Amino acid sequence: MTEEHKSEAPEGDKRMRKIRSYVKREGRMTKGQARAMEEYFPTMGLKHEDGAVDLDQAFGRSAPVVLEIGFGMGKSLVEMAAAEPDKNFVGIEVHGPGVGACLLYAEELGVTNLRVFEHDAVEVLADCIADQSLDRVQLYFPDPWHKKRHHKRRIVKEEFVAEIRNKLKLGGLFHMATDWEHYAEHMVAEMNEAPGFVNTASEGDFVPRPDFRPLTKFEARGHRLGHGVWDLIYKRES
């Protein structure tokens, strides 16, 4: 999460897609991660090059779909899938070791309601996910690109938000979380300008961490040090 949690580029057209808001730090897979990729990706993996995905067919059932963008090492995603077996979970992560770690943990917990992409999320959304097919989209601790000259690389901006709206069902939720206050304010500003969304917060702009989002070790340590975390949940209303 956070620094390990690099999110994908928001630009949608072919020219702009060349800009990436994550850093491709592939790293080396552990033996366990490599084994998980070999053994479990054939049944739990989805490939961008296969094009549009029939999610009911991919999971062998029809159920509400939760999609997470940039799941890092996948620990919280797997725990959410284990806690909500009535939902189908799709994770997108560009870093191979993270995908391997996610699959390994899913196998350890016996999770079967999870499918993963190892690819750029913007391209997956555009090419593989049908419009109005998602019940919840999650974006947790994306790279804040805190230097002002890098703000243009932040994933939460007009084009990306419009694509999320297209993929959500009416009434679907877009849930974001960040540990950078300035980025939280940026998210609010972008979302409040985006057509078709309403903030679900009862007071102010932010919501308490919902029960379905696990508390990460990083986050717990941050709380002990007095660091803040901001959750935002917007509903697609039109």
Image (cartoon, helix red, strand yellow):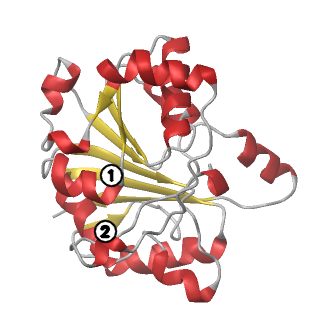
* Quadrant position of residue 42: top left
Q: Which SS class for mark 2?
A: helix
Query: Of 114 and 117, which appears nearest the observer?
Result: 117
Which amino acid, mark 1?
Answer: Leu
Q: Residue furthest right?
A: 225
Q: Is residue 182 above or below residue 113?
A: below
Q: Quadrant of the C terminus?
A: bottom left
Q: Nearer the viewer, mark 2 or mark 1?
A: 2
Closer to the chain start, of discs 2 and 1, is: 2
Which residue carries the number 1 mark? 173
Which amino acid, mark 2?
Answer: Val
Spot occupied by residue 28 in the image (x, y as percentages of width and height):
62, 38
Spot occupied by residue 66 in the image (x, y as percentages of width and height):
33, 39
Task: Please say if the residues under marks 2 and 1 sit with CB atoms less than 8 Å apart.
Answer: no
What distance separates the C-alpha of mark 2 from that of mark 1?
Answer: 12 Å
Which residue carries the number 2 mark? 161
Is residue 38 visible in the rendered structure shown here?
yes
| Residue under the point 52% across and 66% down | 203
Q: Residues within 10 Å of mark 1 (few under 14, many from 20)?
A: many
| Residue under the point 49% across and 40% down | 96
Q: Is residue 141 left or right of residue 65?
A: right
Q: Is residue 21 left or right of residue 162?
A: right
Q: Is residue 184 above or below residue 99?
A: below
